[in-house]
Image (spheres, rainbow, N blue to C red):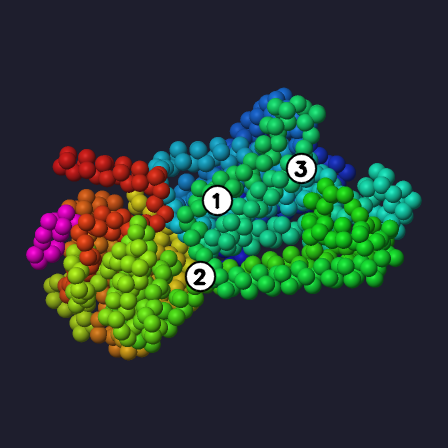
Amino acid sequence: MSRSKTFLRRNPVTLLLIVIVWALWILGASDGLLDDLSVHTAGGAFMLTLLALAVDIPAERTLGWKRFLAVGVASQLIVVPLSLVIAKGIEIAGLNRWGDDLLRSTRMTLIAFIIGTAGFASARLPRLWRRRVRLVILVLPATMALYSGTLPDVIGVTAAVLSIAAGAWWAKETRGAGASASEKRVLTALVVGIVALGPLFVALNPGAEGPFSPVTQLMWSGGASDALTAGLCHSLPGSQECQDALSWSRVYGLGPAVADLIPLLIQLVLCYGLWKGRLAAWWGSLLVQFAAMAVLVTQLFDLDEDGVALYGINLAAVLVPWLGCACVLVWNRRVFSVRENSASVRRVLLRLLLAFVVVSAVWFVGAWLLRASFDDASFGSIAFEWPLRFFPPVVALLLPYALVPGTSAAWALYEWVGTVFWLYAAWQGWRIFARPADPSGDATHARAILESGSGDHLSFMTLWEGNRYFFNEEGDTYVAYRASRGVALSLGQPVGLDTEGCAAEFEAFARENSLRPAWYSVSEAFERPGFRRLEVAEEAVLSTENTEFKGKKFQNVRTARNKAGKEGVTTMWTTWSELSLELQAAVIALSEEWVSEKSLPEMGFTLGSLPELRVPGTRLLLAVGSDGSLHGVTSWLPVHHSGEIAGYTLDVMRRSEHGFKGVIELLISEALLQAAAEGCEWISLSGAPLSGSSSEPGLLDALLSRVGEEMEPLYGFRTLAASKRKFQPTEHAWYLAYDDELALPAIAAAVVHAYVPSLSAADAARAVRAWLAARSEKLKQ
């Protein structure tokens, strides 16, 4: 069966829905037929089509076409009458000053069907897509309602709220845990991007009412000719007719259309930076929200018509999308911690300054040479008009004009000077966000040392984001560390040629900067004068000499491998960049499901997550079913010795709840075979924090063991350690080296901050509730 036939068979109702949308538009556009029940514009039909393709295709596949159809019909029958009641209340209260007359607006679309089915089906989607679908169907209609204020917008909001609630009740949905840091970045970027798209969606409707309606209606009207505009302003300078003609010309045509899209383009570039976790994008997006609110307040400022109270409520409603974006940005501030390279930022700023100078020079020189083509042109008027050329028309309409172009050449200069600059600025912004962040350039130097020399089993983790670097005087050895709570906490041992000398230099550097040095996750062989040790984890190492998995102790491994063969599950040894988009999405969804089951946010530092899978050099091992489904994924970090890969260390380990039971055993055994094929002598299953047992336990060891026992319900480190022992590994202890027992509380706080830097009060409260519940359950047993 062809793909097109399969698509038709799996989505019959959605495709029929799209056909009906366009049929209603055609009939409604034909001599007013079906004017009371139609899609009013082609732009509106296009938007509904996009929305249906985006959210209803997965909804129909989730519910099945019969249930999908039933839910859609029920949504139309319930939501539309209820929305009419809500709309009447809004109009009676006077809360729709800039919107369409909701009581006379009878053009009803199928928006209730489209959004209602998506919201209802979202309860059965994977947690990752459940959040995203709900976010889109809530934020988009709400933004449209506050911008254009039409009845279909009210219907969309009502359908979203009711269908999500009904779906959650139907699926007996329980409240999930928080999203991962990566997902918070995605969700924040989605919210900001959807709100930024609001004015564009409104502009697709020539009959839209709302704060942007004057500009929208001018864009869809015929433009005044250049000669007419110049003639009016020459014969009637400063008149309302001249102002109207100039306003018309300012927003009509290709140049103004592109200029009006510039703010959206800039915000979408910033959303790309938000997705990447960039702090610069966070600051830029926050600035854009306040700038947009300032423009709206200026544009709509009028206290005379409705009085202060009612006007204030209407104005606040218009500002809600932008204010909501600002709140979301501030709420998720902690996940945007990736800083830009200062040298790269300086280069970009220098290029933008140079571009600004060039286009400004083009304006001054061009306007002076074409001064005969402008009405009443002088150097003063050219200088006065100069900054206005860098504002979009929607803002420029609020400002007085100094020049009136009279020819096509003058209009081209008038319209495109600022637009060219902002297009170049957007391109530069995209370039800096597309490049991997390396704030100081030290990570590149560290990678060169690591890959050309030797490191321990954790050394590759030093290349992850969030680390600082200390290099010795020769620059051939470094220490990766985190600084917080007055502690310089290392990530493993020094990497490079002179580890002992670099360690001494690092300790001196830390003390000179009023930091207490602490060596975290170092081997037993690493010793420093005056430092004591405390076991913090236990590493499991497998030799590649035994790849036949013989004997009773490897029964689970053999069973898993045999079951995989029977069920058509194969493994894939690859990298993130080599994965298909479908498998990348599956890995992201699987990781998010795993995070949502935890009471605390994802840990970092020595425990990788989704961003670390993308670090160049990281190997992925996936278990994929014959149908393309993902059963499990593991990541493996290379360990270098004399410039060659000597082994691999296990980092990320995720399994699907729908995958077969032995998928982790399959993946670890396959990694052992792959390492042996590459000539490696061992693989490390990494260390499980707080799960070791010291051979000579002291008071601190006993205390740490108790902490590990109490934290087991939150992260399950001891369960993880027990699962690794199925492979009969050789175990090695990892230690914390410290120089003063009185500093242990500060070191413990620094360790917690290193692992969960984004821990919020809500996260801590959720963890306490989970711990109390586990404690209560334990006491009952």
| Alpha carbons under labels 1 and 3: distance apart | 24 Å
> Mark 3 or mark 1, which is nearer the start of the sequence?
3
Left or right: 97 in relation to 282? right
Question: Of the numbered discs in the image, which one, if any, rests on residue 329?
Answer: 1
Asked whether 120 falls inside the magenta stretch, the response is: no
Q: In this rendering, which labeled residue sits more in front, label 1 or label 2?
A: 2
Residue lying at 36% horizontally and 42% vertically, measured from the top left: 760
Query: Which kind of residue does numbered mark 3 sit on?
Result: Thr
Residue 231 percent coordinates (x, y): 90, 48
Residue range highlighted in magenta: 693-704
Decide: few, some or many residues near mark 3? Use Cα within 10 Å; few <14, some 14-19, many ≥20. few
> Mark 3 or mark 2, which is nearer the start of the sequence?
3
Residue of label 2: 439
Q: Quadrant of residue 521?
A: bottom left
Question: Of the numbered discs in the image, which one, if any, rests on residue 298?
Answer: 3
Question: Of the numbered discs in the image, which one, if any, rests on residue 382?
Answer: none
Decide: few, some or many residues near mark 2? Use Cα within 10 Å; few <14, some 14-19, many ≥20. some
Q: Nearer the viewer, residue 115 or 213?
A: 213
Q: Nearer the viewer, residue 673 or 624?
A: 673
| Alpha carbons under labels 1 and 2: distance apart | 22 Å
SS of the residue under disc 1:
helix
Residue lying at 41% horizontally and 47% vertically, measured from the top left: 334
Query: Which kind of residue does numbered mark 2 sit on?
Result: Pro
Left or right: 94 in relation to 347? right
Q: In this rendering, which labeled residue sits more in front, label 1 or label 3?
A: 3
- Whether pointer 2 and pointer 3 mark residues with C-beta atoms closer than 8 Å, the reply is no
| Alpha carbons under labels 2 and 3: distance apart | 38 Å
- Whether pointer 1 and pointer 3 mark residues with C-beta atoms closer than 8 Å, the reply is no
